[in-house]
Image (cartoon, rainbow, N blue to C red):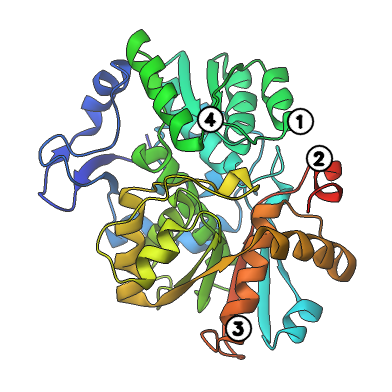
Amino acid sequence: MWNRFDLWCESCGYVLPEDKLAAVSSMGTMSGVCPSCDRALLNARYDMRADRFLHWQEKLKNREGNLWRYRELLPLPQAKRAVSFGEGWTPLIRLERFGGAIGLENLYYKDERQNPTATFKDRQATVAISFLKEQGIKEIVLASTGNVAIAYSAYAARAGMQVYAFFPDGVAEAKIREASLYGAKVMAVAGSYDEAKAAAAQFASDRCLFLDQGIKTFAGVESMKTMGFEIAEQLGWSSPDWYIQGVSGGMGPVGVAKGFLELKTLGFVDKIPALGLIQSAGCAPIAQSFQRGETTVSPVNSPETAIATLATGNPGIAYTLLKQHLDTFGGGCATVTDEEAWAMVQKLATTEGLLVEPATAVTFAGTVKLAQQGRIQPQETVVINCSGREKDVASIVLSP
């Protein structure tokens, strides 16, 4: 046993000990929301005593090149029990031509396309599936616009578990087929992503099955913080000035920010990066609510974007957490139209040899806007989450 953790609520102080997790998980009700105040999420909390991390940075040099190298800060008792394909430890690559063209001297991309199913959602899948297998969970229900369902289905197949995946309108047929090939039982919902989430929740409730809810399931947040760990280590144990990501439900940047916060608590980095949150102009509840200074998010009831992976109309508590970060550590939001995203897909392919999915192109286009607005300074170190690769090239060619 190399790590211990509990779940605690920052709002009211409620603590759920590790030995209670199995009972909660087995009932399929582990939503992550505090059962005491019903307002905040339960966060994983580890033993962060300094003596426990003595020479940790040196030890990492001799560990495997995947995200489980950071095992002391992940929710699994033993690394050998992880369900893994070697995900994580993806390259951090400098963008000299693209960065120079937009006036940024130190622009990098974290190439999450190199993960086993070609997106950063493999991080979420390995941690969540490993933890759920440890708790004896055999069946998982989720809603997805493609990448989560694909990643979970692949890892669940390796673990001998069953996934039920609910897809909204607008998801590329190639993504649905891939999830099905891994053994997922797929359900099409004639409606939005939020409606698919509601259908998945009802299905899970009716059958007493575990419902994975992304940011509301702590394993998802814990998985994403490993990207922050890797970025800091790859930059010589230094935080970038900015971390930028295309945002839908908001779990990714919430997790990455937690990673940098934990590293700063341990004294391994000296600052927390500002967050650049980029959304589709047709579905931008986080960006619009932040620009209006709202304390809670105003949902978008009818998303108007062809980029299904960014069509979360109601990110819920993720907005509150991200706004707190932006208010405390800095950052900003930008929105990008579908047409700007398609143009960026082509530009990246022809100028940098990068073939990315439209959601990633949104991130790059939003970075350009933040630089043009003077929000990002020329000398600042900036890391973009290159979140995934487009698998259906025809969908790009035929798009507006």
Which of the 4 image quarters holds residue 60? bottom right
Decide if residue 17 is on the left or right side of residue 22.
left
Which residue shows up at 30% across the image and 50% down it?
317
The residue most toward the top is: 207
The 10 Å Cα crowd at callout 1, few under 14, some 14 to 19, many 20 or more, is few
Are the two marked residues, 1 and 3, in contact with CB atoms closer than 8 angstroms? no
Q: Position of residue 356 (x, y in %)?
A: 75, 54
Q: Secondary structure at mark 4?
A: helix
Are the two marked residues, 2 and 1, in contact with CB atoms closer than 8 angstroms? yes
Mark 4 or mark 1: whose residue is earlier in sequence: 4
* Three-letter residue code for mark 1: Ala
The 10 Å Cα crowd at callout 2, few under 14, some 14 to 19, many 20 or more, is few
Mark 2 or mark 1: whose residue is earlier in sequence: 1
Q: Please count the marks in the image.
A: 4
Q: Residue 80, labelled with which disc?
A: 4
Image quarter of the C terminus: bottom right
Q: Nearer the viewer, mark 4 or mark 3?
A: 3
Q: Is residue 341 above or below residue 316?
A: below
The residue most toward the right is: 350
The residue to which callout 1 is attached is: 174
Q: Residue 371, labelled with which disc?
A: 3
* Three-letter residue code for mark 4: Lys
